[in-house]
Image (cartoon, grey):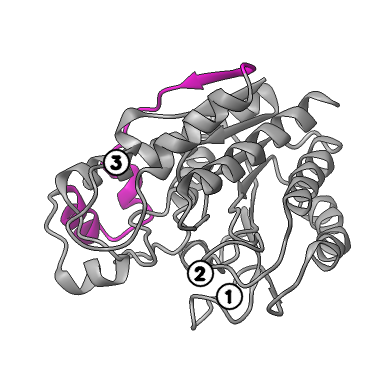
Amino acid sequence: MLHIVHHSDYIAPPPTRGSFAFDKYYLVIEAVKQLSDNHQLYAPHAMEPHWLEAVHDPTYVNEVLSSNVPHEKERRIGFPVSPEISQRVRYTSGGTWLAAKLALEHGYAANSAGGSHHALADTGAGYCVFNDLAVSANRLITEGDVGRILILDLDVHQGDGTASLLAGRNDIMTVSVHAEKNFPVRKARSSLDIGLDDGAGDEQYMRILSDHLPAILDDFRPDLLFYQAGVDPHVEDRLGRLALTDEGLAARERYVIRQSRDRDIPVASALGGGYGHDHMAVARRHALSMLTMADENQRR
């Protein structure tokens, strides 16, 4: 069973400028429905402002919630923050938090959006407005649901915002495996960063994971793993630089779940990146990613 969080407000009207494909979130759910009947949908609540302000600068939070983001910040984000997008990013943050709560109950759960790992304290960046991973991790620990969280970021881009927002915390570990020469140009410092050369494929990628992930899980011993499950390492991704195949992505997802569940660590995934001119093909990769993880979770 795939336990998946989704909200109708994830699909915001197309902004007046920018190239981000907001229809992806509708297409992902449609792809899940086409590929499997074995799923259950959950609707999140909007994240309360005080939890956003616990991680982001309150002035920036107010700019977003009032749809009054300065133009230079909107340029960094990649699109204007309309009232609909302002509402959307509260729901996507609530969705990542809810996916974690469901993962604690079922072993694995997914948010059909989220993974906004470039958002910084006082601005968004790279199509990211609020950092739902950092916000949700902080809330879960503050409310006592868990004591230690690992954020494993396997998006093709480094999770610079997540690393910056959570730097210095000993109860949250950030790990990023990414294309070294890809966005952002200036990398932040995660707890562990592994930058891959352009064109790295299935074999090299899985070797890196097997060399590092078991030891990370054994040494840090998290109570929960947040998984940034971007599908943009795929060879056909428009903004990638790596060369994973469909089979490689599936092997990645099974490995992350298997290693985590063998240690009784629940996994909550966020959608992360995936870009291409064929939006349905990208949505199908995301859907297969989540369904593969749910299937592996049932095998234990």
Closer to the camera in the image, 202 or 170:
202
Indicate left or right for 193 with 136 as reference.
Answer: right
Residue annotated with mark 1: 189
Residue nearest the observer in this picture, 276 or 49:
276
Name the residue beneath numbered marker 3: 88
Please name the amino acid that badge 2 sits on: Asp
Image side of residue 165 versus residue 1, left or right: left
Magenta includes 278?
A: no
Q: Amino acid at mark 3?
A: Arg
What is the CA distance from the residue labelled 3 to the residue labelled 2? 22 Å
Mark 1, other Cα within 10 Å: few <14 / some 14–19 / many ≥20:
some
Q: Which residues are magenta?
A: 37-65
Q: Is residue 59 above or below residue 33?
A: below
Q: Are marks 1 and 2 in contact (CB under 8 Å)?
A: no
Residue 65 point in image, percent of width and height? 18, 48
**Looking at numbered disc 1 in the image, what kind of residue is underneath it?**
Arg
Disc 3 to disc 1, C-alpha distance: 29 Å
Q: Quadrant of residue 45?
A: top left
Q: Which residue is mark 2?
A: 160
Q: Given this view, does label 3 or label 2 mark the residue nearer the observer?
A: 3
Residue 56 forms part of the magenta stretch: yes
Residue 271 can be seen in this image: no
